[in-house]
Image (tube, rainbow, N blue to C red):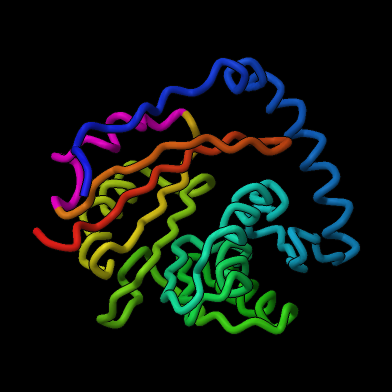
Amino acid sequence: MGSNTPPRCAMPWYLKAVQPLHVPLNIIVRTLRWHFMKKNAPARICGLRVGASLEVPYPTAFRPLAREILRMNLSGKHVLDLETGTGVLALAAARAGAASVVAVDQNPAAVHLAARNAALNELVIHCRAGELFSALPEQKFDVIFYNGVSTARQQHIDTFLQHAGHWLAPAGIAHLILPPEKSALALCKPDQRDHSLVCIQCRYFFSLSRTFLWVQFQKASTL
């Protein structure tokens, strides 16, 4: 199943070098975002049409994450997307062949927007309002995504790490996506998470205005 030794999570030097550029690039992106949202033009992300809202983080920053999900083999998998926002990651999972996708957000505007975007792309995702796992019926998921880049507080991260194992099927994978300033090494310490979860990989993804830390955990099939 693997060791509890955390994978190397240090940010590569070339990503550190571009971090100062994110502030001016964010200003440019925000300006363009206002322009396109005034026109109500859906963003096009990896073949998906994703509508936006002033109340929900703009989806284009998550393009590299959506692209990565589309490369996954999710055929027949049951997927949970926490803090779904516009629903872009949930939509990517549905497009990648997931048998079912549940999308959860604590912001009712995001839940409504994600449902609208699913209809726009003729995909089926089940949208629920609630904080993390609180809105879920008792069921197991093969894959869980938690996109905490825009909204995660430490207490939410702790809650996710402590309870994700309960909602994962045996050998299921939990994907925790965070801003890079979060300590990946601390996240990978066994005493800070459900004992059934093993940290298997840390990766960084770069978009025009953000860098993402992607930490993957796998649930032990036998304990």
Front in this rendered view, residue 86 or 172: 172
Q: In the figure, is residue 196 to the left or right of 69?
A: left
- Does residue 95 sit above or below 82 in this rendering? below
- Does residue 38 sit above or below 154 in this rendering? below
Q: Residue at 45%, 28% (x, y): give it.
A: 181
| Count of numbered badges drawn on the protein | 0
Q: Residue at 58%, 18% (x, y): give it.
A: 16
Task: Check residue 177 for magenta coloring.
Answer: no
Residue 45 falls in image quadrant = bottom right
Please state the horizontal and vertical placement of residue 32, each as a whole percent of the image.
Answer: 85, 45
- Quadrant in the picture for the C terminus: bottom left
Please state the horizontal and vertical placement of residue 146, each as a whole percent of the image.
Answer: 43, 56
Residue 97 falls in image quadrant = bottom right
Please state the horizontal and vertical placement of residue 155, each as a whole percent of the image.
Answer: 29, 46
Q: In the figure, is residue 166 to the left or right of 75?
A: left
Outermost residue, left side: 223
Q: In the figure, is residue 31 to the left or right of 145?
A: right
The stretch of residues the image draws in magenta is 181-195
Q: Residue at 68%, 79% (x, y): give it.
A: 116
Front in this rendered view, residue 222 or 14: 222
Task: Check residue 186 for magenta coloring.
Answer: yes
Please state the horizontal and vertical placement of residue 128, each as a whole percent of the image.
Answer: 46, 78
Q: Residue at 83%, 42% (x, y): give it.
A: 31
